[in-house]
Amino acid sequence: MTTEPVLVGDNHRPLRDVVAAELRRLILDGSLKPGDRLVEDRLAQQLGVSRNPVREAMRVLEAEGFLNVTSRRGAFVARLSARQAEDLFHVRLALEPLGARLAAAAEEPRQDLIARCREILELVRESGPEQDLDTLSTLHTELHSLIFEMTGNDYLIALAIPMVKRGQWLLRQSAPLQTPSAWEQHEGLIAAIAAGDPDLAEAAARHHVLSVRNGLRPNLHEA
């Protein structure tokens, strides 16, 4: 089912950010598909904003890798190739274990963020396979983003959050997020962070990324 864009002109957040969030949502839930062309005038009318925030939002999504923009052809939803997916996992293998280690080693653990991660895991446990994939992919992205926020390292956060969002797109298309086993590794990861065990948290994050990559490889090479 195609989801209609919502009118965002009256939102109090900066319009660029609101439009970027809405376009990202449409890409992630499949309403805007790889290869689809984005027309500024049409999107501005659909979203109830002027062309400027749409243009600025497109630059944000281009930087995040969701759009390919050229001066002659315009903006198109990007296609994620098997090579690009592999490149993404190389970066995840570098950043996610580091993020987990720093989160677990924080001098002042963010108990509020840890609590939210546990809420997410509990929500997934309660809903099980009945939860829709859009919601699960959003929760998955939030959980991984929260881990990086726990580090308090602004440089790492700036690098990692776009990667996490890009990963959501890949997982939304290919990963079995609706199966309980897809979330089991997150339980151990959050437990290690909450326990303040950097070594265990780092190992759990690395194992998780490798497990997801190995599970996705057959699908990626078929694409």
Image (tube, helix red, strand yellow):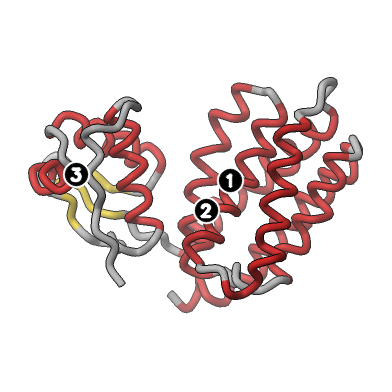
Q: Position of residue 15 (x, y in %)?
A: 27, 29
Cβ atoms under marks 2 and 1 closer than 8 Å: yes
Name the element at disc 2.
Answer: helix
Residue under numbered circle 1: 142
Cβ atoms under marks 3 and 2 closer than 8 Å: no
- Rounded to the nearest angstrom, the CA distance separating label 3 from label 1 is 25 Å
What SS does tag 1 mark?
Answer: helix
Disc 1: CA contacts within 10 A as few (<14), some (14-19) or many (>=20): some
Identify the amino acid type marked 2: Thr
Query: Is residue 68 found left or right of 39 in the rendered image?
Result: right
Q: Quadrant of residue 131?
A: bottom right
Is the residue 146 above or below the residue 85 in the image? above
Where is residue 167? Give x, y as percent.
53, 53
Circle 3 SS class: helix
Residue 142 on image: x %, y %: 58, 45
- x and y percentages locating residue 26 in the rendered image: 32, 55
* Of 48 and 64, the residue lying toward us: 48
| Mark toward the start of the polypeptide (3 vs 1) | 3
